[in-house]
Amino acid sequence: MNREFYYRWELQLRANPAALWPYVADTNRFNRDTQLPAVTESAPVLPNARRQLRFQSKWLTANWTEDPFEWTYPTRFGVVRRYKNSPIKQMRVVLEMTRQPDGGTQLVYQVWALPRNLLGMAMIPIVIGQISARRFRAAFIQYDKLAQAGAVPVSLRHASHLSPGAKGRLETMKQRLAQAGAAPALVNRLVDLVQNADDLTLARLRPYLLADVWEAPRRDVLELFLLATRAGLLDFQWEILCPMCRGAEDRVHHTLAHVTSAAHCQTCNIDFEVNFDQSVELTFIPNPAIRAVKAPDFCVAGPQVTPHIAVQQLLAPQEQRVLSPVLEAGRYRLRTMRLPGAQHLQVTAVGQSQVNLRAEQDGWPSHELKLIPTPSLQLTNDTGEEQLLILERTVWSDQAATAAEVTTLQRFRDLFSDEALRPGEQISVGSLTILFTDLVNSTHLYREIGDATAFGVVMNHFDVLREAIDAEGGALVKTIGDAVMAVFRRPVSALRAILQAQQVLAAPPAGQRPLRLRAALHYGPSIAVSLNNQLDYFGSTINIAARLEKLSQGSDVILSDAVCDDPEVADFLTNQQAQRQLHVTPFSETLKGFQEECFSLWRVGRGEEVKG
Ligand SMILES: [Zn+2]
């Protein structure tokens, strides 16, 4: 039997384990930075997420089966690879990070390598013992610097890879973006990023994540990216995310017209329905005319591929394991790939410090367990087969610019009015706030001041509305005669927008006539469709909002109980009533087309209520 080689490298780093984790556990970046060749998946994913991979370099081709990565955030991960027809038979690596009293980290990297033959025995001490040892050390030292700075990785080894003529084009674009209203400081950061960041970073630019790094408002950065896409600096990537692993393999579309409501995940082997509020994320990549980004895979399943998973462990039948993860407060679930259902957990300061979690053939306990952020977890596989236990956060990252958010931005609709779904496609957008308005007495207006003048007045009133809607992060979807339909993500934004528009229209500059606007808001699930090649919405939420608008008398706003129940709206109304700016009157009504139902509604009016 061949002797197994063992290596252990230890480093003292300045950053803490949680700050180092996003860099160190990004095995795709690490393998690239340590000059391993790119890998390709050579066959379908096997049960329990075992993958069959290969790489090909000038002097070596290797095929292997890779066990699922195992990890416990933010202290430990490892993986086992079994090679076929290669001088190395098997390799196991484990990285461990221990927080030091001074706030830094002791990082220990261990490798166990089993040679298959004499060539392997000769290779391992050179390839792993010398070359990898040197490169790994350099990578960890670089990550320590990045982690301390909280920085976006930029290319340290290569000069810029700009396309021919790109320098000149970038200068023109900078000017155009500034003319379009983008903040010059943000424009410079984006251009700097496109020139200097490495390909792995540029292959998937997430505007909200960059906004957080740049300490800039998220909406400003998202709007800059939209402008930059229009200007030809960036391209869209609509990514379809699996509800389980949240991966987006082979599911990147360059236009919404290619997004369909039915999708499949290979890794999880499930079919799922696509929705705009969770499973479609808009990311960006530089336009090839500026910089051609090549980002092949160097590792496909490391912990950073699925950062919402805090713990992933592969347990043999009847195996037991004790772990000490660090968990952010919030809701989690523990599941396996083979058993149906999941154990629901909540991480809270008042939870249990020790928890036993068992995967059993006959299902999971139905009650939610509460645990503290630094629990001792005992995992047990009580079934007769191997199980991959996955402890994951259930909330979706708020750093994702979802399609639901992006498509309700006025800037998006203005710049990309042609971005629509394929005709006939219907995709859930989750809950939206719908605003309907209509001009009071417009027929009278046309008769009184003549068609041409009245038309101008109506057009101006659309501008006032559009400005108020845009300022609150909503989007005007369409005008129907003198009526407007707009959408917002947050009910309180819609309420503030319509109150602002009504106020401006009621008190115009001298010489112009005041206008009154009927308005209503409803909040609920909606469906995105394409109508006249534009993104539109339908569903009973929209129908109800349209009906509610008829109940408005002009200068007031009708709110459904779904809007009033929203905590932000409730706070806003309480405040405004306390300052005697607004008054709110409850009433109820049955609506046309919704005969059976009696709706609880609220009428929001300006100033104090007039009694009597
Ligand atoms: Zn999946």
Image (spheres, rainbow, N blue to C red):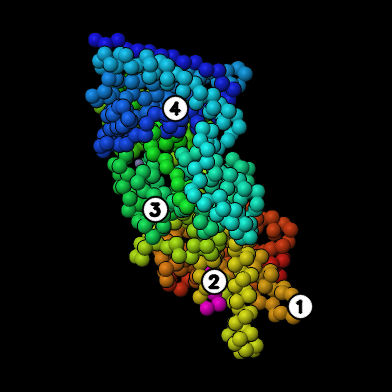
Q: Residue at x 51, y 56 (%)?
A: 232
* Nearer the camera: disc 2 or disc 3: 3
Q: Residue at x 59, y 53 (%)?
A: 171
Tell me the CA gap for discs 1 and 3. 51 Å
Tell me the CA gap for discs 2 and 4. 57 Å
**Which SS does the magenta portion mostly show?**
strand
- Residue furthest right as drawn: 510
Q: Is mark 2 within 8 Å of ligand 1?
A: no
Residue 34 marker:
4
Residue type, label 1 = Ala
**Which sits earlier in the primary sequence, circle 4 or circle 1?**
4
**Which sits earlier in the primary sequence, circle 1 or circle 3?**
3
Residue 510 marker:
1
Q: Residue at x 34, y 26 (%)?
A: 314
Between 523 and 400, the one lying in front of the other is 400
Find the magenta span and give its range.
481-486
Whether residue 150 appears in magenta in the rendering, the answer is no
**Which sits earlier in the primary sequence, circle 1 or circle 2?**
2
* Nearer the camera: disc 2 or disc 4: 4
Q: Is residue 165 left or right of residue 36?
A: right
Q: Secondary structure at mark 3?
A: strand
Residue 253 marker:
3
Residue type, label 3 = His
Between 173 and 212, the one lying in front of the other is 173
Q: Which residue is mark 2?
A: 484
* Nearer the camera: disc 1 or disc 3: 3
Q: Is residue 13 left or right of residue 302?
A: right
Residue 468 rendering spot, x and y as whole percentages: 63, 64
